[in-house]
Image: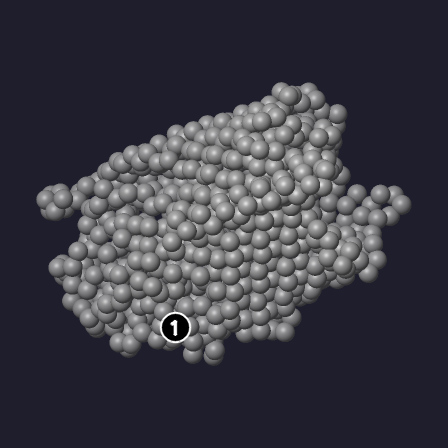
């Protein structure tokens, strides 16, 4: 099937090359040049700090992991979406999902506020416990990897968003299984002046912002402060976020600049409002009375980002970009909602079931992550070829300290070897994990014939992962084969091969095969051997996971009833073979002590789909956009899954499932976003939006089905400029206008209520907050 799909990808390009060359010859015209922006040949205006945005003759390399100053999609062999900062500002969204809904193929899980886990093309939808998302998230060249697997970004500080779909490790390295989201923060002379803004909304939502910027002959910069908070819809769900960010840019000369950017954010979040089962979701959607408990609570997060970049345009189509960065993430939170409270002698307390005690958790996790590195890229273009070469060096450190908050046991049976007593204050994890990456990557573009361009990419990663525990091992633990350190080096190649055929100046076909990869984690490699009581066997011979993306598409600029239309259509298949799973299954364990529990390369999944995007000019009186995704995600291998049954105090035999052929959970087959705008005057704009998706399963065993939903949003913007140059803006936004009841998230993996049957009363559910309003006012002078 893969061979057929590859052949299909190449066939339209070959047919197009012969037919359209013939058509142009018969018409007496010239064969169209490779597709570039219409103003490419003449646009030498300094863009973003003095670097000229000049197309490189016939062939230009726009790929970069550092910057957005090469933002054209023309000539690209992959599916790419660009969103500018003005669009982000006009959305007035609570989180980045409100913006990314307009991009086909994007799915995301909103945790709270603007904390979001972004996924592309349904990859990694089956996982939800803070794992990496399978998408490279890059902010100002910094490959952001937060402890929770989510991304937090100040929406008021976004200059542009670029979404690359398909395996993207050929540029971004590890975890770009399904693509990359590249975010560039605000910069430049347009930030000069003063901006003040305030917002209010449902659930006592308040937000304030102040930005001050300046622009001199060779120095521009700004600094921005914002703070937002809300009581939230959910009981114990209050959250807050505080940002301080800015950028300083020095123009060395007409062709080079150096830029320093920083961001500090302090965030807090309590409960996410989960409940157990559909009955509790119906009678207690805010999780106030049914005893629902999140796995983790009481998050306090400090994030610090800083980057320093240098750019130089040497002329004649050559330029250099260099970026250094530092990212720190300090997160503390409660975790472990279940167990049985005891005193130091091991006697059960009168009230002991932690699952029924909302404010009692087993442990507190204090983690400090540090990411630092350097990237450098040089590119050169010409009439027949273009190239880019890059160097990527990065170090990642994760310092973890976990301490018992209470004295407890996992079960209410007598204390013993299989049910040890965990004493309050005991440090259960004191470790350091590191990852050192040394990588080289490059791109080569070749004009094979006048309308046909080939693109080849390759990246080589050398990744060394290390682990050390600072908790001394006992003699017994040493005799059991437990270790306090481990080290493993992976050497991985990633590739992309693509073709782009310019049917005309405004239409082009593109096709590519690309790969993504992910290296095993320390816990997957060494299992329980690096923990005092773990039972998972080590497997240091694990191989990196790899994805293969096959894609063919067409992008065009045309007219429909006299309205300019920008369209992009893509068909894709994304295969992951031998991805890493526990032999017990996702979040499961084997049913008996004799069963082998180990992480192995035994998983497989195939995601196929169609993506259609169409946009019109938002400055017209009437305009609209559509983003449609058809997705079919199937497990091609998932035949080792044992579902835990019964309660902790009275466990029952686990039930075996063979999930091969099942649909990946939380992957609706159909998803559509429709947006329409009416610009009544130059000052007034009214926007209506519809988000609809079909139903999906809540679990890998495909037992609990959740129906589809359609949600409508409405927004009005008013903007006016005075004669003195002041700009007043106001907006009002209503999300979920018709107060549609639905689940924001639903996840099922075991018999959580302990009744011996897995059904709709077992999944963990977060109910949507319903109709929510926001309004704001801003002034720029």
Residue at the image position 60 percent from the left and 30 percent from the top = 59
Residue 584 is left or right of residue 368, and the answer is left
Whether residue 69 can be seen here: yes
Picture coordinates of residue 302 (x, y %)?
49, 45
Residue that appears at 73% across and 45% down: 195
Quarter residue 207 falls in: bottom right
Locate residue 279 relative to residue 476 in the image: left or right: right
* Residue at (38, 75) in percent of width and height: 760
104, above or below 204, in the image = above
Please tell me which residue lies in front, 245 or 97. Answer: 97
- Residue 95 visible in rendering: no
- Secondary structure under badge 1? loop
Residue 149 in the figure: left or right of residue 420: right
Quarter of the picture holding the C terminus: top right
The answer to which quarter of the image holds residue 645 is bottom left
Alpha-carbon neighbours of circle 1 within 10 Å: few (<14), some, or many (≥20)? many
**Residue at the right extreme, as displayed:** 723
User: Is residue 312 depicted above or below 398 in this figure?
Assistant: above
Q: Quadrant of residue 446?
A: top right
Image coords of residue 772 (percent x, y): 62, 67
Q: Is 704 placed left or right of 57 in the picture?
A: left
Image coordinates for residue 570, horizontal then vertical, percent: 54, 52
Closer to the camera in the image, 457 or 716: 457
Q: Farthest front residue?
A: 26
Which of the pair 146/314 is nearer the observer?
314
Q: Residue at x 58, y 33 (%)?
A: 449
Quadrant position of the N terminus in the picture = bottom left
Residue at mark 1: 704
């Amino acid at each position: 099937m893969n061979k057929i799909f590859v052949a299909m990808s190449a066939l339209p390009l070959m047919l197009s090359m012969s037919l359209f060359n013939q058509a142009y010859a018969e018409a007496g015209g010239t064969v169209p040049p490779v597709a570039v922006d219409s103003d490419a040949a003449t646009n030498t205006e300094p863009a973003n700090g003095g670097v000229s945005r000049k197309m490189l003759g016939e062939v230009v390399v726009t790929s970069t992991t550092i910057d957005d100053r090469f933002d054209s999609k023309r000539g690209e062999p992959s599916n790419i979406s660009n969103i500018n900062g003005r669009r982000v500002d006009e959305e007035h969204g609570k989180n980045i999902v409100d913006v990314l809904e307009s991009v086909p193929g994007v799915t995301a899980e909103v945790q709270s506020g603007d904390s979001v886990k972004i996924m592309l093309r349904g990859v990694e939808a089956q996982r939800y416990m803070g794992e990496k998302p399978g998408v490279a998230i890059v902010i100002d060249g910094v490959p952001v990897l937060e402890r929770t697997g989510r991304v937090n970004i100040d929406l008021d500080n976004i200059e542009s968003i670029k979404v690359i779909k398909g395996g993207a490790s050929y540029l971004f390295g590890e975890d770009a299984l399904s693509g990359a989201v590249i975010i560039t923060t605000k910069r430049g002379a347009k930030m000069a002046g003063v901006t003040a803004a305030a917002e209010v909304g449902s659930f006592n939502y308040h937000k304030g912002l102040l930005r001050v910027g300046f622009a001199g002959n060779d120095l521009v910069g700004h600094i921005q402060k914002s703070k937002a908070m809300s009581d939230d819809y959910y009981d114990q769900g209050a959250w807050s976020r505080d940002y301080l960010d800015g950028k300083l840019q020095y123009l060395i000369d007409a062709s080079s600049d150096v830029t320093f950017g920083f961001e500090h954010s302090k965030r807090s979040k309590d409960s996410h409002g989960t409940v157990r089962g559909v009955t509790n979701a119906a009678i207690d959607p805010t999780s106030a009375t049914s005893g629902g408990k999140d796995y983790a609570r009481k998050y306090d997060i400090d994030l610090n980002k800083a980057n320093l970049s240098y750019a130089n345009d040497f002329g004649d189509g050559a330029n250099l970009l260099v970026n250094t960065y530092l990212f720190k993430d300090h997160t503390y939170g409660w975790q472990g909602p279940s167990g049985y409270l005891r005193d130091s002698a091991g006697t059960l307390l009168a009230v002991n079931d932690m699952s029924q005690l909302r404010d009692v958790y087993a442990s507190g996790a204090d983690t400090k992550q540090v990411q630092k590195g350097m990237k450098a890229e040089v590119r050169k273009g010409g009439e027949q070829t273009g190239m880019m070469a890059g160097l990527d060096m990065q170090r990642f450190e994760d310092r973890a300290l976990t301490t018992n908050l209470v004295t407890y046991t996992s079960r209410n049976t007598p204390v013993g070897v299989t049910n040890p007593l965990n004493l309050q204050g005991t440090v259960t994890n004191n470790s350091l994990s590191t990852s050192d990456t040394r990588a080289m990557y490059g791109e080569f573009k070749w004009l094979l014939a006048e309308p046909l361009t080939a693109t080849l990419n390759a990246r080589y990663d050398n990744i060394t992962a290390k682990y050390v525990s600072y908790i001394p091992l006992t003699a017994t633990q040493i005799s059991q084969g437990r270790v306090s350190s481990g080290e493993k080096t992976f050497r991985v190649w990633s590739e992309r091969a693509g073709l782009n055929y310019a049917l005309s100046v405004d239409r082009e076909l593109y096709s590519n095969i690309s790969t993504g990869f992910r290296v095993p984690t320390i816990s997957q490699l060494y299992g329980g051997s690096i923990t005092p009581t773990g039972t998972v066997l080590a497997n240091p011979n694990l191989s990196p996971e790899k994805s293969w993306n096959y894609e063919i598409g067409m992008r065009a600029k045309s007219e429909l009833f006299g309205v300019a239309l920008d369209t992009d259509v893509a068909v894709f298949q994304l295969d992951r073979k031998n991805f890493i799973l526990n032999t017990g299954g996702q979040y499961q364990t084997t049913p008996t002590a004799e069963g082998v529990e180990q992480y192995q390369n035994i998983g497989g999944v195939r995601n196929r789909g169609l993506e259609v995007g169409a946009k019109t000019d938002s400055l017209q009186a009437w305009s609209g956009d559509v983003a449609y995704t058809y997705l079919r995600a199937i497990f091609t291998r998932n035949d080792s899954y044992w579902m835990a049954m019964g309660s902790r105090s009275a466990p029952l035999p686990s039930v075996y499932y063979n999930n091969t052929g099942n649909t990946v959970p939380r992957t609706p087959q159909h998803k559509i976003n429709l947006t329409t705008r009416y610009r009544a005057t130059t000052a007034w704009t009214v926007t209506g939006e519809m988000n609809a998706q079909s139903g999906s399963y809540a679990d890998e065993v495909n037992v609990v089905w959740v129906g589809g939903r359609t949600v409508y949003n409405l927004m009005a913007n008013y903007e006016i400029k005075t004669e003195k140059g002041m700009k007043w803006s106001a907006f009002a936004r209503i999300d979920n206008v018709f107060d549609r009841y639905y689940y924001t998230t639903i996840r099922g993996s075991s018999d959580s209520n302990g009744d011996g049957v897995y059904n709709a009363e077992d999944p963990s559910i977060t109910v949507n907050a319903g109709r929510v309003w926001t309004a704001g006012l801003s002034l720029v002078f």
